């Protein structure tokens, strides 16, 4: 089966970034600690590896082979059933046993300043995590671990984030760097420059092509997501059935790995899969599926991120077609629509509670405690049998909230997460 990569309408990979950046209008996130990003005279030239040949609506095919590493796939497949160290009641502190980093050189008394270079708060997943991170920050400030956290938001732009990291380095006023990379290859040199300062560097969420960080924090990974979702769809579909795969944008390791794993499993099971980049735009998602449904049956929908899942379901309703077998995410809008429709579904997670872990890692580093060199967090999908429990536990949360956010024990719960304004 030959895989086809398409761009829906005129949405291209670079415009996807702009669409994501436009999502953030959360009033609760208007915090004076978030500093306007430094200007970069090269920003208009675009991010590395993106935007080529797309002015006419055509996109370069994202060759999943260049992102697929069999050894990493096998490792993450095994980690799906691994035993995690630590208390399951605090999964943001759990990890898979492995190499540890000695941080005794960083042990010192007194509150320290953290400098956070964030990719963005431009989508519901990142907004949920950002709220949780700030609640955790308040706890650590109260306990005298962190004096302040200066944050610079790159608004989904590689060049801006590079400038942000270099600004922090040049400023010389940081005791630790926390970095959530916008993309993989482009941000690697800036992360290495941060490491060269000799200060602790905590990378989380997305990865970079260097192992210089004090710790790299992430859930199991994109391959695990791809395996969970594609195996679920394959088990509930028949050979020859068609799956429409909805992808946000190219060039981000965790997203590319999700599709690279899923594509192989679909091929192995004789599932026809066609994939599109959507920019997470609900209107574009509806257009893509409406066009596909107009030309034939679609039995399954696969997503590399769940925001926009409701729009995908509504496309089937608008067309008067049976609901597909579908994978979304643990966003509340999908969990609620899944329950309402009774469709056959799965909610994979990219554990949102990971936004707590970087600051807790900083606390350990300032205390001179060992931290996992690669801090792998649990990543367990929500099944139909568990859905009702997560809906009940998150009753009153907005649709853009993520069920496995892990902030129930923080001071602002639940009001802080309920009060945010997400379009």
Image (spheres, rainbow, N blue to C red):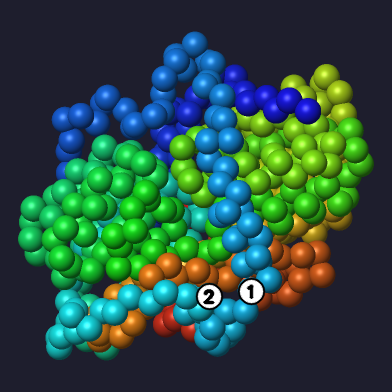
Q: Secondary structure at mark 2?
A: loop
Q: Is residue 62 left or right of residue 117?
A: right
Could you say which disc has been placed on residue 71 in the image?
A: none
Q: Residues within 10 Å of mark 2 (few under 14, many from 20)?
A: some
Is any atom of residue 131 visible in this view? no
Quarter of the image where the N terminus is located: top right
Q: Residues within 10 Å of mark 1 (few under 14, many from 20)?
A: few
Label 2 near label 1: C-beta < 8 Å? yes
Q: Which residue is mark 1?
A: 82
The CA distance from mark 1 to mark 2 is 7 Å
Q: Position of residue 357 (x, y in %)?
A: 41, 73
**Res. 308 image quadrant:** top right
Q: Secondary structure at mark 1?
A: loop
Q: Position of residue 249 (x, y in %)?
A: 51, 36
- Above or below, 347 against 283 in this view is below
Pick whichever, 343 or 71, lies toward us. 71
Give the residue drawn at x 54%, y 16%: 58
Could you say which disc has been placed on residue 96 in the image?
A: 2
Q: Is residue 309 left or right of residue 410?
A: right
Pick whichever, 302 or 235, lies toward us. 235
Pick whichever, 165 or 151, lies toward us. 165
Mark sitting earlier along the chain (1/2): 1
């Amino acid at each position: 089966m030959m895989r086809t990569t398409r761009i829906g309408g005129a949405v291209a990979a670079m415009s996807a970034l702009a669409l994501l950046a436009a999502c953030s209008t959360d009033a609760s996130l208007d915090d004076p600690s978030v500093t306007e990003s430094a200007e970069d005279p090269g920003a208009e030239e675009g991010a590395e590896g993106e935007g080529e040949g797309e002015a006419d609506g055509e996109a370069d095919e994202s060759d999943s082979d260049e992102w697929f590493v069999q050894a990493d796939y096998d490792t993450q497949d095994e980690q799906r059933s691994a035993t995690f160290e630590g208390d399951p009641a605090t999964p943001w502190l759990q990890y898979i046993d492995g190499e540890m980093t000695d941080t005794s050189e960083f042990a010192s008394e007194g509150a320290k300043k953290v400098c956070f270079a964030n990719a963005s708060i431009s989508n519901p997943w990142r907004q949920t995590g950002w709220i949780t991170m700030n609640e955790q920050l308040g706890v650590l400030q109260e306990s005298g671990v962190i004096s302040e956290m200066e944050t610079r938001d790159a608004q989904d732009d590689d060049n801006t984030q590079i400038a942000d990291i270099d600004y922090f380095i040049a400023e010389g006023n940081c005791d630790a760097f926390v970095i959530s990379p916008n993309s993989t290859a482009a941000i690697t040199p800036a992360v290495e420059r941060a490491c060269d300062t000799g200060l602790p560097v905590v990378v989380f969420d997305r990865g970079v092509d260097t192992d210089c960080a004090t710790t790299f924090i992430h859930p199991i990974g994109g391959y695990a997501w791809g395996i969970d979702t594609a195996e679920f769809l394959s088990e509930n579909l028949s050979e020859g059935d068609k799956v429409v795969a909805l992808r946000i944008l190219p060039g981000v390791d965790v997203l590319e790995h999700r599709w690279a794993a899923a594509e192989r499993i679909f091929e192995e099971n004789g599932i026809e899969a066609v994939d599109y980049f959507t920019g997470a735009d609900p209107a574009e998602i509806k257009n893509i599926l409406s066009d596909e449904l107009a030309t034939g049956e679609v039995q399954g929908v696969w997503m590399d991120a769940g925001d926009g899942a409701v729009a995908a379901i509504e496309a089937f309703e608008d067309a008067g077609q049976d609901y597909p077998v579908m994978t979304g995410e643990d966003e509340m809008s999908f969990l609620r629509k899944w329950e309402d429709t009774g469709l056959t579904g799965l909610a994979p997670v990219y554990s949102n509670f990971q936004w707590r872990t970087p600051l807790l890692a900083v606390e350990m580093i300032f205390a001179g405690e060992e931290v996992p060199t690669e801090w792998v967090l649990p990543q367990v999908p929500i099944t139909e049998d568990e859905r009702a429990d997560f809906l009940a536990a998150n009753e009153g949360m907005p649709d853009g909230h993520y069920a496995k956010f892990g902030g129930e024990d923080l001071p602002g719960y639940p009001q802080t997460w309920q009060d945010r304004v997400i379009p």
